[in-house]
Amino acid sequence: MDANQYVKDKQIVIFELDDVLFPEKDYLLQVYYLFAQFIEYTEQKSAQPILGFMRSEYENNGAEKLFEKTANQFGIDPKYKYNFDLLHQNARLTLKLLLYKNMLEFMQELIVDRKQIVIVTAGNPEQQLNKIKQTEWNGLEQYLTVYFVDELGQSKAEIFQNILNSSNLSANEALVVGANKIDEQQSKLINLPYIVSLEIYK
């Protein structure tokens, strides 16, 4: 569907990061690769089967308890949980994160039309900032304003409302682009128009 119809009467568009602007797995799989390489270097355990296990487990069951499952499978010392968690926050990626093509084009159109772009992202603030720093924004970075939900200690609905207040905008002048029920519920709490990011790809 033509994205322009969503924003013709909007002044500001609010995005989440993960699975909205880029696939979260593009970040996590690189973190797992770096961790497997780290274990190979420190413990002389082959990285390839470790990475293969982590990838399969993540794709089938998600990221929860992935270190514990991997440690149990390969006899990895629990002390390396610290390194695993730290890599999530400060990993230097081999490949930059790439925006979904249609989302990149959508954001570029927003800039041309002089719309404000805001990112409101949940999750560990250091990890989310690390993702932002290692994303190929194609020049969009200078137009972004970012709010970290966990750092502010507010709900998304409260942050959305504060953004509207600071910009002197009504709810119908903004749009939230998300990828999950939480984003949708938080938007509805203050009557903010909401669309699933996948809608923009149609």
Image (cartoon, rainbow, N blue to C red):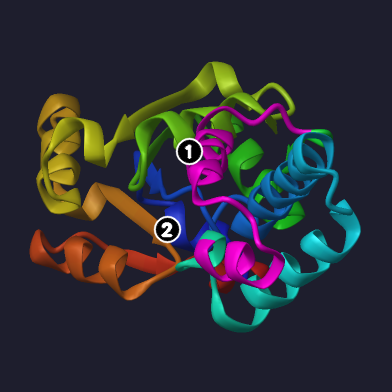
In-image side of 129 versus 77 (left or right):
left
Q: Is residue 82 magenta?
A: yes
Q: Residue at x 20, y 71 (%)?
A: 185
**Foreground: 103 or 108?**
103
Q: Which stretch did the figure color magenta?
A: 68-93
**The label number, if any, that marks residue 196 in the structure image:** none
Whether residue 133 appears in magenta in the rendering, the answer is: no
Quadrant including the N terminus: bottom right
Q: Residues within 10 Å of mark 1 (few under 14, many from 20)?
A: few
Residue at image point 19% right, 44% down: 160
Tag 2: amino acid: Val
For disc 1, the marked residue is 82
> Can you give x and y, in whole percent of width and height, for residue 33 in the image?
78, 48
Residue at left 74%, top 46%? Answer: 30
Q: Residue 177 shows which numbered tag?
A: 2
Could one spot residue 169 in this view of the protein? no
